[in-house]
């Protein structure tokens, strides 16, 4: 009988029930979309902030200590280098997945044909790597120097010109020498002389504008420094620092075992630095404060902003649902009065009303969840041009929310209905 | 006149008699309006507030010498071209080679307050120098010479030998500095020591030229370009350049963020408005009996629609006013919590919020009222 009554309500009053389901679906979709965007916005903004370049630099240990003792005036050859063969290892650390991009650098002093001094920087442009894990990665400055403006020609494409003597020239130098893409320039290093073909002229808005950028092995060959690397710039996705990270950054040994584990297994910039030092022999990895600190601040603000907007929209959605549920239960007073008149108990009346509402809420909630996933994807694709990761933890949150909201919405209405006296209701008051 | 009076009396009476139900409707309208005014305020304020956060990345414009002489005065002249409220910090730098323990070190002289404002990411272990003869030491220098905060060190400078007359013995100038802090930036700044411009003048014995000035300006990229062109054309001694890496990236990220807030605002707004509309529909739909009764005693469809519309628009108006106030409070809370600064009040938003909420409530009650008037009064009154 109970089931038949419920079925009866759902079918006979399908219009009204559909409206409740629709409102609940809207609320649920809003909650789903906002929660997914909120939980994912950190990663997405982090990715965007990668346009600021590397947040970790790795230099040889000796260089960082001896730099001042030797020569401050320029010549950077302190005799200490990192090993090019170890570069792949950066992608094998615990937080390898968070290493977004990296590029090695070597600065070589060279002379132009007119005898003037010039710095040739060797690096990766779009270096292709096959990692021991089977993963493939294109890393290099093409993506790490996204703010460079190519004024003439193209980015150097390392993959299609293997071992060719090609280079890119900074705009200041190009103007001075009258170079354009397609021209060639002769540079003489300490061990060999090369004739490099210019494929592009870039404007970096900094010191790089007076330098020549060439593939790593081309630059190494100029100074007979095969396999040597001056520094590595690493761009990693990191978690904003907290007290633990600050303490660890000073001295990882001061932590207790469990603190150390938490720190090591969290993507703090200091723990990623520590892990890079573990795999690259005799290296010092340090965060680039300019990028690392600002990223943390901006990330925190964006997340907080989204949390607050989410809370507002959740409150809005819940109150909307509450309202509608209350209104729809109240208007059934005459029906409920009749039921009570023919002897229905308070408990069974409330049970009936609640079951109806919950079946409706279930339908609405499920539909709303999928609609919300759709909204989240639309936001993700329009703003960040990538999909938003829908986390499984959203499902219970939304479910609890829908149940709570419908319950809170129906309780005052049901209490009011129970207080009604059947005679009054049936009389039409 | 009497007709209008009656109209208002009916509306007010119907609102008062059905107080609890109307309160429910009003609440939902007010929430809709709050979301509207709150989110739109945030949307307009985000670029300004976030822009300030982005100043954490440090200088976005640098001044270099256009000709030989480049002094503090030239820097100030250049900075005068920029609106005062946009300037976050100006740090002029003068670099000289000095010696610590007889080995060469690059010393940079700057205005400490300016450097602190222009490069907020500098992390200083200890204190920033605030008095004369205090020194901020880069982390690498500190490590090489085993320098600690609180200790004293002699910095010496060898004056230009060529200017000395024959036979004159050139003596080193030196000053004892107190080390107040160790600077950690992860960049080349760690290789320098920092002192005030006055100390540098005393150490070298000459006023000297500024090498470069870093400016942190709170402005979007087109505004920055405009400033740069203005300075380059108006001040002949200064060569202004933008720090591309900072400006270009800031534009990308800010645009994305604003697009995100916009899209979220639109989605939330659309959904809340639909919620308001369904609530209004429900509230009106349950009064079909009343509509039937009115029709039975001779009310025209037009007058019924007019009365219901009047009622819901009044609700919309009250909800809109409440919402504008609550929305501003919400936006203010967000701004204080997230950016710790207050938000600017947008007067235009108040009428917009009120109009939108009147329109939404009016439109959403129009449909059920219309369908109710189409029904035969006899049927409605009979209870079907």
Image (cartoon, grey):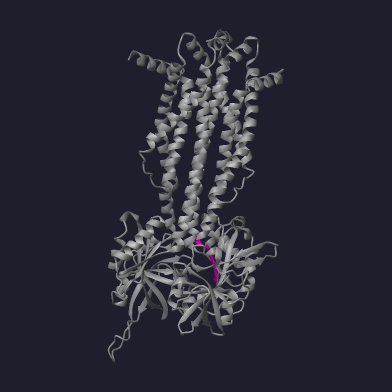
| Residue at screen point 55% across, 7% down | A427
Image position of B158 (left or right of A64):
left
Can I make out residue A75 in this image? no
The picture places residue B212, in percent across and down from the top left corner, at 36, 69
| Residue at screen point 40% across, 71% down | B193
What is the quadrant of residue B126 in the picture? bottom left
| Residue at screen point 65% across, 31% down | A363
Can I make out residue A81 in this image? yes
The picture places residue B2, in percent across and down from the top left corner, at 34, 13
User: Residue A227 in magenta?
Assistant: no
Count of residue discs: 0
- Examine the rendered structure and indicate whether residue A276 appears above or below residue A107: above
What is the quadrant of residue B81 in the picture? bottom left
- Examine the rendered structure and indicate whether residue A161 appears above or below residue B324: below
Q: Nearer the viewer, residue B343 or A248?
A: B343
The picture places residue A69, in percent across and down from the top left corner, at 47, 79
Image position of B177 (left or right of A62):
left
Q: Nearer the viewer, residue A163 or A117?
A: A163
Q: Nearer the viewer, residue B382 or B61?
A: B382
Q: Which quadrant holds the N terminus of chain A?
A: top right
User: Residue A54 in magenta?
Assistant: yes
Q: Nearer the viewer, residue B102 or B185?
A: B185
Residue that lies at the very extreme toward the bottom in this rendered image: B167
- Examine the rendered structure and indicate whether residue A277 appears above or below residue B339: below
The stretch in magenta equals A52-61
The picture places residue B356, in percent across and down from the top left corner, at 43, 33
């Amino acid at each position: 009988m109970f089931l038949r009554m419920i079925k009866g309500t759902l079918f006979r009053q399908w219009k009204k029930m559909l409206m409740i389901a629709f409102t609940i679906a809207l609320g649920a979709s809003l909650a789903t979309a906002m929660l997914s965007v909120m939980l994912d916005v950190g990663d997405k903004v982090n990715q965007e902030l990668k346009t600021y370049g590397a947040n970790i630099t790795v230099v040889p240990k000796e260089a960082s200590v001896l730099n001042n003792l030797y020569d401050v005036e320029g010549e950077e050859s302190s005799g200490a280098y990192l090993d090019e063969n170890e570069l792949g290892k950066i992608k094998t650390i615990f937080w390898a997945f968070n290493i977004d991009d990296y590029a090695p650098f070597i600065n070589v002093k060279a002379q132009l044909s007119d005898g003037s001094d010039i710095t040739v920087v060797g690096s990766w442009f779009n270096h292709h790597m096959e990692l021991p894990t089977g993963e493939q990665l294109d890393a290099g400055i093409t993506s790490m120097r996204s703010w460079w403006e190519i004024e003439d020609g193209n980015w150097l494409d390392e993959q299609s010109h293997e071992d060719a003597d090609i280079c890119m020239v900074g705009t200041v130098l190009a103007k001075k020498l009258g170079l354009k893409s397609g021209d060639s320039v002769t540079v003489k290093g300490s061990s060999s002389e090369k004739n490099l073909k210019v494929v592009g002229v870039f404007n970096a808005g900094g010191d790089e504008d007076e330098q020549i950028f060439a593939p790593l092995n081309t630059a190494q060959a100029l100074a007979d420094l095969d396999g040597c690397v001056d520094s590595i710039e690493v761009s990693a996705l990191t978690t904003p620092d907290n007290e633990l990270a600050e303490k660890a950054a000073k001295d990882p040994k001061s932590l207790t075992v469990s603190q150390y584990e938490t720190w090591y297994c969290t993507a703090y910039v200091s723990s990623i630095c520590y892990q890079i030092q573990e795999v690259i022999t005799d290296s010092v990895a340090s965060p680039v404060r300019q990028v690392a600190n600002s990223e943390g601040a901006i990330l925190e603000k964006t997340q907080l902003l989204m949390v607050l907007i989410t809370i507002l929209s959740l409150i809005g959605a819940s109150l909307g649902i509450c309202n509608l549920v209350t209104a729809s239960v109240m208007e059934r007073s005459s029906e409920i009065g009749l039921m009570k008149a023919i002897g229905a108990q308070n408990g069974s009346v409330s049970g009936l009303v609640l079951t109806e509402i919950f079946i409706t809420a279930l339908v609405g909630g499920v539909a709303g969840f999928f609609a919300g996933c759709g909204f989240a994807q639309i936001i993700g694709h329009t703003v960040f041009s990538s999909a938003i990761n829908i986390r499984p933890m959203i499902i219970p949150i939304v479910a609890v929310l829908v149940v709570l909201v419908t319950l809170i919405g129906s309780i005052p209405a049901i209490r009011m209905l129970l207080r009604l006296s059947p005679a009054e209701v049936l009389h039409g008051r | 006149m009497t007709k209008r009076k009656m109209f208002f009396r009916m509306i007010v009476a119907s609102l008062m008699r059905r107080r609890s139900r109307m309160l429910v409707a009003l609440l939902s309208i007010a929430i809709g309006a709050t979301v509207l005014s709150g989110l739109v305020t945030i949307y307009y304020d985000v670029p300004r507030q976030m822009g300030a956060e982005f100043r954490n990345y440090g200088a976005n414009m640098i001044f270099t010498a256009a000709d030989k002489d480049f002094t503090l005065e030239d820097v100030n002249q250049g900075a005068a071209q920029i609106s005062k409220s946009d300037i976050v910090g100006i740090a002029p730098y003068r670099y000289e080679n000095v010696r610590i323990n007889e080995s060469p070190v690059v010393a940079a002289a700057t205005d400490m307050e300016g450097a602190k404002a222009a490069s907020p990411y500098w992390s200083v272990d200890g204190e920033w120098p605030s008095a004369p003869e205090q020194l901020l030491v880069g982390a690498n220098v500190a490590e090489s010479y085993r320098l600690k905060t609180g200790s004293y060190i002699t910095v010496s400078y060898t004056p230009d030998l060529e200017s000395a007359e024959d036979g004159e013995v050139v003596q080193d100038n030196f000053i004892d500095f107190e080390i107040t802090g160790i600077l950690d930036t992860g960049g080349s700044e760690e290789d320098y020591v920092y002192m005030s411009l006055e100390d540098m003048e005393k150490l070298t014995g000459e006023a000297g030229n500024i090498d470069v000035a870093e400016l942190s300006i709170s402005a979007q990229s087109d505004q920055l370009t405009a400033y740069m062109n203005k300075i380059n054309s108006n001040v002949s001694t200064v060569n202004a350049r933008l720090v591309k890496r900072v400006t270009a990236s800031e534009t990308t990220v800010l645009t994305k963020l604003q697009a995100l807030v916009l899209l979220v605002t639109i989605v939330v707004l659309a959904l809340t408005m639909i919620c308001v509309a369904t609530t209004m529909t429900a509230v009106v739909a349950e009064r079909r009996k009343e509509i039937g009764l009115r029709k039975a005693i001779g009310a025209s469809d037009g007058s019924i629609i007019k009365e219901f519309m009047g009622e819901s628009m009044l609700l919309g108006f009250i909800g809109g006013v409440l919402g504008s106030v609550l929305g501003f409070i919400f936006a203010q809370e967000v701004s204080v919590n997230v950016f710790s600064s207050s938000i600017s009040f947008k007067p235009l938003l108040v009428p917009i919020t009120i109009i939108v909420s009147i329109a939404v409530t009016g439109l959403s009650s129009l449909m059920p009222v219309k369908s109710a008037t189409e029904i035969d009064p006899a049927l409605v009154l009979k209870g079907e």
